[in-house]
Amino acid sequence: MKTLNAIFDAWLDELKMIVKDEGVVLFFILLPIGYPLIYSWIYNNEVAREVPVVLIDNSHSAKSREFAQKYDASPDVCIAYRCGNMAEAKSLIGRGKAYGIIYIPHDFDKNLGRHTQAHISVYCDMSYMLAYKAIYQTATAVSSAIGASSAAPLLFEEVPIFNVTGGYGNFIIPGVLILIIQQALLLGVGMIAGTRRENLRYGRTLRDQEWKISGMLGHSLAYLMLFSVMLAWITLVVPRIFGFVSLVHGPTLFHFLVPYLLACVFFAITVSSFVRYRESVMLIVVFTSLPMLFLCGLSWPLSNISGFWQGVSYAFPSTFGVRGFIRMSSMGAEFADVEHEYLGLWAQTVIYFLLSCTIYQLRGRFLYKNQDSTTK
């Protein structure tokens, strides 16, 4: 009974601390609610339309004019300028008047007539991913259509299976939403840990349960209570607001996300043991967010990630969480298909729970010992 009371006191104290700290409220509540809405709204259109490009046609042939006509007829791009050389075209790109260049060489029609390889060069501004995608994919599609008009040994129809819109939102947003939970916990828990250490340096007295295992359990319950709501908002509500593909059912999703949330909470508590100042956690999250996104295999293929870095990625709950959630939500995978990720999350939960208990016990002994010697 005494242990339960200590856990309850720690839980209540942690909730009070969260509510009173504006920075923690920002990371625990406003960030998980607002960031998914803003990010999803930005990419809600999924694809870019009428992206301006520059055409350099040195062929001046019927085939090059056919290419330009079909390219300009695409809804994704428009030929806004025609130039005679690359210098003029680069000047337009530099001034932001266009996002790409289509260069047709002088031997384009001649090579097509000889049934040899004809080349068209595409130059894109890589700072805007949707524009790059529209310019490049349209050029590829028109080139294939013109080549097929000469000889079509095999007719085929391209049908997307999972990302039916072909858009950036359905491709990457679901994974980013899962990553937000882990990063928000890292920020908030790290800021709380930094605050505690700063208070100790200014002579604040420790509560009996603050750095004991019962305190860790109470703190964990507070984080779980808040982020259970945030996780439901991010995985169930936000995708439906913006019409993202969601093929997973509620009970299956709940079954998978329970170990993910537990692993994230204990992972955040473990990492927070290295935070000495409130501001330090900002540096940790800023420098780890992008690597975590790449390592989970969402924006970079797993086949191109070395074995060493794949091993490093297993230390983060987001790796298993993003992979499993994407397969279930976007690809319609059954629970058995994500068993590897599911077991990985439970393994992380156990490991980080034991680390959290050890850290609280060791730090508690050290701090109470120092506090007693200071009092004497």
Image (cartoon, rainbow, N blue to C red):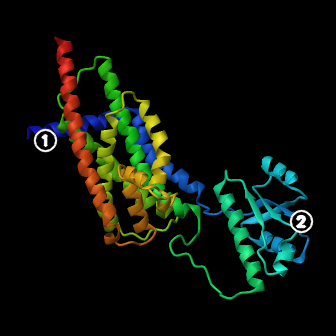
Image-based side of 113 in relation to 167, left or right:
right
* Depth check, front residue: 199 or 288: 288
Callout 2 amino acid = Asn
Is residue 138 visible in the rendered structure shown here?
yes
| Dot 2: element | loop
**Residue under numbered circle 2:** 58
Above or below: residue 109 compared with residue 320: below
| Dot 1: element | helix
**Residue under numbered circle 1:** 4
- Answer few, some or many: residues within 10 Å of disc 1's Cα (few below 14, many 20 plus, some between 14 and 19): few
Image-based side of 223 in relation to 107, left or right:
left
Task: Find residue 114 and name its label.
Answer: none
Quadrant of the image occupied by residue 218: top left
Callout 1 amino acid = Leu
Q: Residue at x 51, y 53 (%)?
A: 37
* Depth check, front residue: 367 or 235: 367
Q: Residue furthest top?
A: 376
Quadrant of the image occupied by residue 57: bottom right
